[in-house]
Amino acid sequence: MAPPTATAAPAQTLTALAEEKTLQAKFVRDEDERPKVAYNQFSNEIPVISLAGIDDNEGNRRSEIRKKIVEACEDWGLFQVVDHGVDATLISQMTRLATEFFALPAQEKLRFDMSGGKKGGFIVSSHLQGEAVQDWREIVTYFSQPKRLRDYTRWPDKPEGWIAVTEKYSDSLMELACKLLEVLSEAMGLEKEALTKACVEMDQKVVVNYYPKCPQPDLTLGLKRHTDPGTITLLLQDQVGGLQATRDGGNTWITVEPVEGAFVVNLGDHGHYLSNGRFKNADHQAVVNSNTSRLSIATFQNPAPEAVVYPLKIREGEKAVMEEPITFMEMYKRKMSKDIEIAKLKKLAKEADDDEKKKKMKQSLFDNNNKESFESKPIDKLFA
């Protein structure tokens, strides 16, 4: 995507495009990638778990909570939590500020343009290079932990209060994430700090997603199908609906029902590998609609780049799901490189001018999709 500029602002945000009657071609997905279930056709399959009493080490409450969380992680890699201890006023403030940011004029948002490899800011669709089809979303994102690495020049300074509220929100969400990882460590028969320690120094990235109403939502996605690369993700979503999950390779999808004040919790690839595949890395996407915009705020808790990715415990009779230990940075680069290569092949297959070329491209796409390992690109070749 070409770097946005102040003069081209209307074309580089989705605000103006939301009023058009026809979706631009760059957002149109192949038929096999388009939504199969409506944004508001809610399912109750994803468990909602109360964390009340999670710190009770004397009674049975902690073990009851642990059992429910483990079942959810083995089944979907996805669950929702209520009674989580994050202040309701703080959640309300964070949501209000995020809503106000995306209501700013385009030129204000584009002051934080993150194209050119910047580590944080505003962008449309995705910060990855080479995306063949764009997602129907605007995002603002920045690293919030460790605190010593915060770059406040990449954090929005409008609306007033954004930085102070985000700092508190970041700390509260990190505390909650670590508490959930302690429960999963115990479930694996390890000391409760095991998963957190495996991250070396856990970092946290905030990603605020804004999905404007869309003229043809049946042709596109707000966020394409994926698994998160990191350890554990906490998502605050509004009541509109749009988060979807699959556990059968994308054949069937469910829409996660929004629960007021709840956080959606999902495990990423790192958490999946540390558990030797016992806990699923949630396979999910976001869909959009033509009636109203949607907002969600994700915090991604990830290991340090140098952290080693390999199962912490291999149960009797099991084999390791990884051939060898690698660093998280290498794992991340391989994952993103694969995504970019597949996107490129899809584009070439679509543009092929004869059936034989199309057949070759589709076979190459299939082969690459099923590769376990993938040669990684340098990090500066991954980001737009």
Image (cartoon, rainbow, N blue to C red):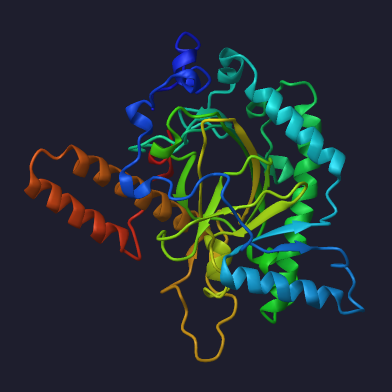
Residue 381 falls in image quadrant: top left
Nearer to me, 231 or 292: 292
The answer to whether 331 appears left or right of 199 in the picture is left
Q: Is residue 376 above or below residue 73?
A: above
Query: Where is residue 38 drawn, in percent x and y?
Result: 51, 46
The quadrant in which the C terminus is found is: top left
Q: Is residue 8 above or below residue 71?
A: above
Count how many numbered circles sit on residues in the image. Answer: 0
Along the horizontal axis of the image, is 358 left or right of 285?
left
Location of the N terminus by quadrant is: top left
Q: Please name the residue shown 42% across and 39% down the image.
A: 218
Coordinates of residue 181 in the picture (x, y in percent): 71, 65
The residue positioned farthest toward the bottom in the image shown? 317
Location of residue 111 in the rendering, given as x and y in whole percent from the top left corner: 58, 18
Q: Taking the image as drawn, is residue 135 in sight?
A: yes
| Viewer-nearest residue: 271 or 201 | 271
Q: Position of residue 29 (x, y in %)?
A: 35, 40
Name the outermost residue toward the right: 58
Residue positioned most to the top: 7
Residue drawn at 25 percent across, 58 percent down: 366
Residue 193 appears anywhere in the view: no
Task: Choose between 59 and 129: the one closer to the eye.
Answer: 59
Left or right of 369? Residue 300 is right
Q: Quadrant of residue 197?
A: bottom right
Q: Residue at x 64, y 66 (%)?
A: 198
Identify the residue shown where x is 31% and y is 43%: 30
- Nearest the viewer among 127 and 361 is 361
